[in-house]
């Protein structure tokens, strides 16, 4: 059976959900997989809603549209409310417990991994890296891609002006992975 996974990544605009979706797509391509990445913006840039879908597959991808994802990364409460009910049974969701009450995360139907992404990013030195923490947790929880494939793909998605931040982003990804048991 060929390898396949899909994920919806969602949060407020400015939380970097589109960036980590793009990063996941590049990491998939680096591993020889077929990939789709579709960003969805809310009406506002910062503070509005943003989400994206990523599909990774060894086979050709018939449609980039995901109605019932296998994976979910939610960075805020409105995203949890909107997408958690759509997650497939036994799917994996990464919940940013810095901004979402852990009691709201389903625990029986799906595997919820609670990650205090903002606090971990703060310890690393920049709250804006909470997205990378969440992505690291997702990659480790699913085991679909090697963590190092994601880290080496950082150079593809971080603009040249911010290349000096790649080591801290890599640290945030690793810290997120360490949260997963």
Image (cartoon, rainbow, N blue to C red):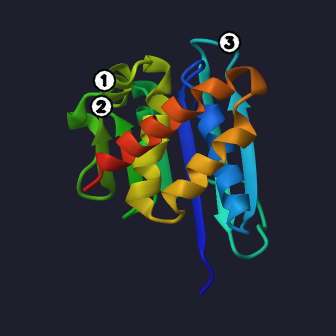
As helix, strand or loop, the secondary structure at mark 1 comes to: helix
As helix, strand or loop, the secondary structure at mark 3 comes to: loop
Left or right, 52 with respect to 178, comes to right
The answer, for residue 83, to whether it is visible in the render is no
User: Which residue sits at x=24%, y=51%?
Assistant: 107
Q: Residues within 10 Å of mark 3 (few under 14, many from 20)?
A: few
Pinpoint residue 68: horizontal percent, then vertical percent. Answer: 54, 56
**Which quadrant of the figure has residue 14?**
top right
The Cα–Cα distance between marks 3 and 2, rounded to whole angstroms, is 26 Å
**Tag 1 near tag 2, CB within 8 Å:** yes
The Cα–Cα distance between marks 1 and 3, rounded to whole angstroms, is 26 Å
Tag in front: 1 or 3: 1
* Picture disc at residue 116: 2
The Cα–Cα distance between marks 1 and 2, rounded to whole angstroms, is 6 Å
Pinpoint residue 17: horizontal percent, then vertical percent. Answer: 58, 32
Tag in front: 3 or 2: 2
Sequence-wise, the earlier of marks 3 and 2 is 3
Residue at label 3?
Answer: 44
Sequence-wise, the earlier of marks 1 and 3 is 3
* Picture disc at residue 119: 1
Q: Nearer the viewer, residue 83 or 133?
A: 133
Left or right, 5 with respect to 113, comes to right
As helix, strand or loop, the secondary structure at mark 2 comes to: loop
């Amino acid at each position: 059976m060929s390898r396949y996974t899909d994920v919806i990544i969602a949060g407020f605009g400015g939380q970097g959900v589109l960036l980590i979706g793009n990063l996941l797509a590049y990491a998939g391509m680096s591993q020889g997989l077929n990939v789709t990445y579709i960003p969805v913006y809310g009406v506002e840039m910062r503070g509005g809603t943003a989400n994206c879908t990523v599909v990774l597959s060894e086979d050709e991808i018939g449609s980039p549209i995901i109605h019932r994802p296998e994976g979910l990364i939610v960075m805020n409460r409105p995203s949890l409310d909107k997408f958690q009910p759509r997650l497939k049974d036994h799917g994996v969701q990464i919940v940013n417990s810095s901004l979402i009450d852990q009691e709201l995360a389903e625990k029986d139907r799906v595997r919820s991994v609670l990650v205090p992404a903002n606090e971990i990013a703060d310890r690393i030195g920049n709250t804006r890296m909470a997205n990378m923490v969440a992505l690291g947790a997702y990659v480790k929880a699913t085991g679909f891609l090697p963590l190092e494939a994601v880290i080496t793909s950082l150079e593809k998605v971080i603009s040249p002006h911010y290349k000096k931040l790649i080591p801290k982003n890599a640290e945030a990804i690793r810290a997120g992975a360490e949260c997963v048991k």
